[in-house]
């Protein structure tokens, strides 16, 4: 007996986005957000949705300001910057102390008002530059999170479709098995009915 294709399965055909939305997401296609609509279309067309975001980011050339912001953020968050900053502080204090001991006056006496001014200006300039770099990184993280959501949703929908196909196939196989058993029982009953008259005649 040749296996039959399950009535509710479209294993070789393509689904429609509306059908995907109603069957698997429990809502209409129009009510979905843009990412869910994109996933439904990819599932319906049987196309992959994963892509290499790293190459996509590398293909977009950042501006000179963006590159400068990234360089400042990279250097400002390194041990080299911490070491240079500490060395500059020690040098400033040592230089003022040496001049003070030599001439009894210095250009920036304790509590180092001029040094505090320079540090305040450095922080005022460095903070927005680092924030610019962090904003770019946040935009990349948001795109990555949206892509992960699309990939995960598509994988979930594909698994649900696979479960439906397996369930439909199993129900079809059970039906075929019951039909085969019914035919076998019918043949067995016919054989028993044939042997009964022969056994009676031989006696």
Image: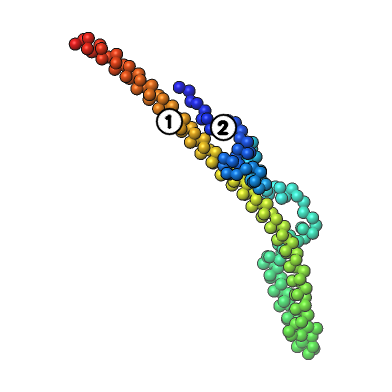
Give me the residue at 57% from left, 44% from top: 26
SS label for mark 2 = loop
Residue carrying label 2: 10
Near mark 2 (Cα within 10 A), the count class, few <14, some 14-19 or many ≥20, is few
**In this rendering, position of residue 3 left or right of residue 54:** left
| Quarter containing the C terminus | top left
- Residue placed most toward the observer, 166 or 59: 166
Furthest residue to the top?
201
Q: Is residue 65 visible?
A: yes
Near mark 1 (Cα within 10 A), the count class, few <14, some 14-19 or many ≥20, is few
Residue 162: horizontal and vertical position, in percent? 53, 38
Give me the residue at 60% from left, 39% from top: 20
Residue 171: horizontal and vertical position, in percent? 46, 32
Residue 114: horizontal and vertical position, in percent? 78, 80
Residue 167: horizontal and vertical position, in percent? 48, 36
Above or below, comparing residue 165 to residue 129 in the picture = above
SS label for mark 1 = helix
Residue carrying label 1: 174
In the rendered image, which quarter is residue 186 located in?
top left
Give me the residue at 38% from left, 25% from top: 181
Residue 163: which numbered mark, if any?
A: none
- Residue placed most toward the observer, 178 or 148: 178
Per the model, the C-alpha gap separating discs 2 and 1 is 19 Å
Q: How many marks are shown on the rendered structure?
A: 2
Furthest residue to the bottom?
104
Q: Earlier in the sequence, mark 2 or mark 1?
A: 2
**In this rendering, position of residue 50 left or right of residue 73:** left
**In this rendering, position of residue 192 left or right of residue 68:** left
Above or below, comparing residue 97 to residue 196 in the picture = below
Q: Is residue 48 visible?
A: no
């Amino acid at each position: 007996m040749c296996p039959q294709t399950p009535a509710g399965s479209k294993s070789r055909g393509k689904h429609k986005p509306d059908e995907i939305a109603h069957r698997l997401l429990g809502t209409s296609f129009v009510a979905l957000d843009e990412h869910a609509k994109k996933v439904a279309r990819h599932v319906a067309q049987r196309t992959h949705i994963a892509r290499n975001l790293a190459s996509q980011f590398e293909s977009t050339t950042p501006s000179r300001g963006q590159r400068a912001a990234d360089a400042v953020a990279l250097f400002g968050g390194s041990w080299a910057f911490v070491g240079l900053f500490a060395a500059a502080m020690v040098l400033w204090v040592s230089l003022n102390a040496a001049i003070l001991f030599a001439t009894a006056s210095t250009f920036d006496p304790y509590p180092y008002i001029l040094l505090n001014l320079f540090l305040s200006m450095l922080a005022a300039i460095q903070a927005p530059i680092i924030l610019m770099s962090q904003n770019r990184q946040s935009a990349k993280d948001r795109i990555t999170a949206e892509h992960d959501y699309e990939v995960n949703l598509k994988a979930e929908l594909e698994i649900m479709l696979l479960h439906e196909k397996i369930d439909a196939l199993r129900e079809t196989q059970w039906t075929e098995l019951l039909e085969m058993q019914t035919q076998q029982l019918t043949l067995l009953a016919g054989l028993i009915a044939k042997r009964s008259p022969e056994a009676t005649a031989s006696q």
